[in-house]
Amino acid sequence: MTYDCAIIGGGIVGLATAMTLLRVQPGARVVVLEKEDDVARHQSGRNSGVIHSGIYYKPGSMKARMAREGNLSMREFCRRHDIAFEVCGKLIVATDERELPLLDNLFQRGRQNGIEVEKLSPARAREIEPHVNCVAAILVPSTGIVSYRAVAR
């Protein structure tokens, strides 16, 4: 059999490329070549599974924009394909007073990047995570988790 395109690697990047190519060129004959017995057997299947918010990136940067858009599009993809995911949020904490300026910097970055962020007291942070010990925290509600191996499949 002949193909119009061969993609080497059955990780997230290779599979997303194949899917996009088929969306742009319906009817194209695309083959994904993978040396393992299943997809996402390396980095794509071994990562932390975080659906990132983009809070750590420089405001207005492409990384910030792509992370925010990727967060939304990954959740939509999972809904469309019945893939389990959870938008559990993320706590970022300052464990001592010296870290407060860094925490405030992240809070400001989040706001500048259009990400929902909330400042929390230590008591409120403990309501969310009883084992946390901090002087202040911020909550990033849009951060989630997913199995990228399930996404790849």
Image (spheres, rainbow, N blue to C red):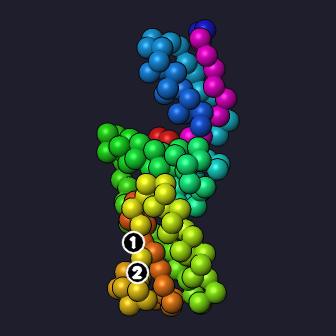
55 over 32 or under it: above or below: below
Any magenta on residue 62?
no
82 over 49 or under it: above or below: above
Other residues around mark 1 within 10 Å, as few (<14) / some (14–19) / many (≥20): some
Could you tell me the amino acid type at mark 1? Glu
Q: Gap between marks 1 and 2, in whole Å? A: 6 Å
Q: Secondary structure at mark 2?
A: strand
Residue drawn where x is 43% and y is 58% of the image: 115
Left or right of 125 in this view: 47: right
Q: Which residues are magenta?
A: 3-12
- Which image quadrant is residue 26 in? top left
List x then y, in percent, for residue 7. 63, 25
On the image, numbered disc 2 is attached to which residue? 120
List x then y, in percent, for residue 114. 43, 54
Other residues around mark 2 within 10 Å, as few (<14) / some (14–19) / many (≥20): some
List x then y, in percent, for residue 97. 59, 90
Could you tell me the amino acid type at mark 2? Leu
54 over 32 or under it: above or below: below
Residue drawn where x is 57% and y is 21% of the image: 31
On the image, numbered disc 1 is attached to which residue? 118
Residue drawn where x is 41% and y is 67% of the image: 117
- Which image quadrant is residue 14 in? top right
